[in-house]
Amino acid sequence: MKKFRVDNWKTLSISLIAVLGCTAAMDVVAQDQAQDRQQANSLEEIIVTARKREENIQDVAIAVTALSATEINRTFARDLKDLASVSPNLVIDDTSQGPGGVAAIYIRGVGVADVEKSFDPAVGVVVDGLSIGSNAGSILRSIDIASIEVLRGPQGTQFGRNTIGGVINVSRSKPTGVVGGKVRLGYGSYDTYHAEGIFNFPLTDKLAVKLSAAENNQRNGYYINAATGHHIGSVDYKMGGLNVLFTPNDSMELEYTGTLERTHQDTPPLLNTGQSGALFCTAFGFCSPSVHSTITGSRHKVWIVPLRPPNPNGAALSISTIDQLEPTTFNASFDADTHIVEYRWDVNDSYHFDAVYGHYETHEKVFTDWDGTPEMLYHTDRPGDWKQDSLEVRLNKGGSGRFTWVAGAFLWKSKFDIRLRSYIGFNPYGLVLDIAQFGYQTTKSKALFFEGDYAFNDALTLTVGGRYTKDEKTSRARGFVDTSIPLSSGAPVDFAPGLSGDPSDSWKKFTPKASLKYHLNDKTMTYFTWSNGYRSGGFNSRVNSYSEAVTPYNEETVENFELGIKSEVLDQRVRLSADVFLMNYDDKQEEIHLPDTLSGTGQKTVIANAATAEIKGVEFEMQANATDNLYVRANVAYLDAKYKKFSFDDDGDPNTPDADFSNLKPRRAPKWTGNIDTTYEWPMGDNMVWARVSYHYIASDYTDFTNAAELKNSPQNLFDASINYDWGRTRLSLYGRNLTNEDGYMIGYDVAGLWSYAAIRPPRTFGFEVTHEFGGE
């Protein structure tokens, strides 16, 4: 364990000391005013399952934020990225690099923003106990969600591998066993309609069923295609779900959840933001007028050229001329099937057993214009498949004793298949190279974990835990690489030696955790936590040579120190939490884009354990029933993320010094984030009216590791608002999102000096919605 420097503690603890002082003062005020407060207006107790057991959020010694179904519905969020404001130091974007939502989720500056399935997530997304192992598809639609928990910091004990940044834990509603349900219909900007329905009913007194269905169809995109003048970016999402709950007796439950999702959309458009010095600017004249604009002069206008070479002949390299190109369409699809089976058994008053099996499978097709110019310079056709299966078993020891614990085992296997064809029209210009690359990879993982609490007395509790994880990966990559081979031959270059010689490697890690929590009184708890996180090593499936195909990169680790406080004051009308943290990031995996003169694409992506970093910060959250009519939720966070060392071999020559990029700032690590969300309600006759206003602030940040000026976001100020009328069990709503029409970049990539591309966040939208509930108890 590394030494925790005293100067860091002094720096990071200032805000926490202030919060402690304010909390103590507020407790005094609470005692003086208690007789004037009504218990009916106390905040609702929040139960979380962040540690694989049910606990009051105020009694959990980690930084966790929770959002209830009511709060989720009041945001009018369509997917997970619309809920990013819920937690401090949380950034969620869609990279627009593929269909179905390719997530770039960062917590405290730790995350991954790449479409390749060989790059494991750094923030776990868990749905009803199932971990999503790929960035694609992890921007979940906010349909039928009962709760969301955001766990900040490495979660190496309970959730294990690939959660070094944290976890987003999503739970959907369970079958009620009572006839009833909900219907929601809406229409909004860009000719968008959505319809959702949930229907609960019993089959027997022991068997309950829930059916769900949804469609969200945005028929006009918010980009204009400069080539045609038409809108582009439409998305049609459909979902159907079946949830069955069997309760044979009071102590057992068996639950099945199946979800089928189908997305058909325009390929996500990408903006060319290239500047002078980039090849596409200097050689072809496709230059942005400023670092704040794109080559079209607008962040809402893109060049999409629907052309492709003739049907490929199956060779790893074929060549066409410009006049041989054929028209095509930039359509994409993403199909996802999810199946989850969970068995829950209350063995007795002290012991509870859980077993969760999950299967997640996706199939995608996408043809992308990456260069965003009037020419065909860099297009790809990229179908791919993903499949994963997992099983987790847990035994919880609860009861009234001093020692409680949870122990379990976890098994995982996954595989993906990518069949990439790159159509390159700049190298050389006048010809279009059809370059094939194929990637296939399998992963097996197994883990044992334990976490226990020992209560010395009613005030002081010690927690210790650990997880042992072993990951094994086998990779296979094939394709054309070296343009020094005569192009006329079109000969495939197989840079994996065959099935028997496919490269494989394994990584294993023990990730411990310890924490101490102390109750100052029955409403205030303070804690100190030391935790570790681990992200597996692997093989890059996007390769250009044999050595890249067979050379693995190693695991990365994070060590986290955290001091926090949680309190409820003013007769539980106000809930406060604050923490300071320091994270040491070692062997950080970086996705680095480099020029490559031997590659037909002119560039390559390498993965290297190139960096160490230090990340520290302060976080504060509040919930309050400020008055009988006014509810307020707020958070603010300060983040100081910096590289201690960042260097790598950028020219392939072992005799030259490594390039040093230690002066760069980590991407997606804004120094300040904050949010205030207010809801005010009042009676209107026998019914209720309520209004909501939300403000979310994101300080300037970089979207690309190179810190390219054209891919830097200025500070963003995001406002949402709604007005709602509750009429019995029917609600009428008018809402607006991003009212200031912020156009910050969700993704940005500097492609090895060729050009740079980006995609903006959704612009200002308005909508109308009707919700009706029926039946139920």
Image (tube, rainbow, N blue to C red):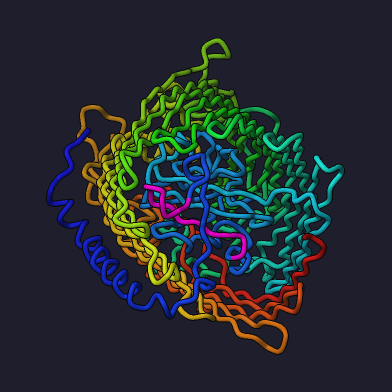
Report whether residue 713 is seen.
Answer: no
Residue 611 placement, left or right of 58: left
The image quarter containing residue 584 is top left
Image x and y of residue 481, in percent:
50, 29
Image x and y of residue 208, in percent:
80, 45
Image x and y of residue 766, in percent:
64, 77
Residue positioned 43% across, 33% down in the render: 598
Residue 721 on the magenta span? no
Pick the residue in front: 265 or 562.
562
Q: Is residue 201 shown above or below 655?
A: below
Tell me the quarter of the image containing the C terminus: bottom right
Residue 158 placement, left or right of 131: left
Residue positioned 51% across, 39% down in the render: 52
Q: Which residues are magenta?
A: 56-70
The image quarter containing residue 126 is top right
Residue farthest along the bottom direction in this orientation: 685
Residue farthest along the left direction in this orientation: 7
Residue positioned 46% across, 48% down in the render: 113
Q: Is residue 247 shown above or below 777?
A: above
Q: Is residue 347 shown above or below 297?
A: above
Report whether residue 315 is seen.
Answer: yes
Pick the residue in front: 8 or 33.
33
Residue farthest along the top direction in this orientation: 500
Tell me the quarter of the image containing the N terminus: top left
Image x and y of residue 246, in percent:
76, 37
Residue farthest along the right direction in this orientation: 203
Q: How many marks?
A: 0
Pick the residue in front: 561 or 371.
561
Residue 60 on the magenta span? yes
Pick the residue in front: 397 or 750.
397
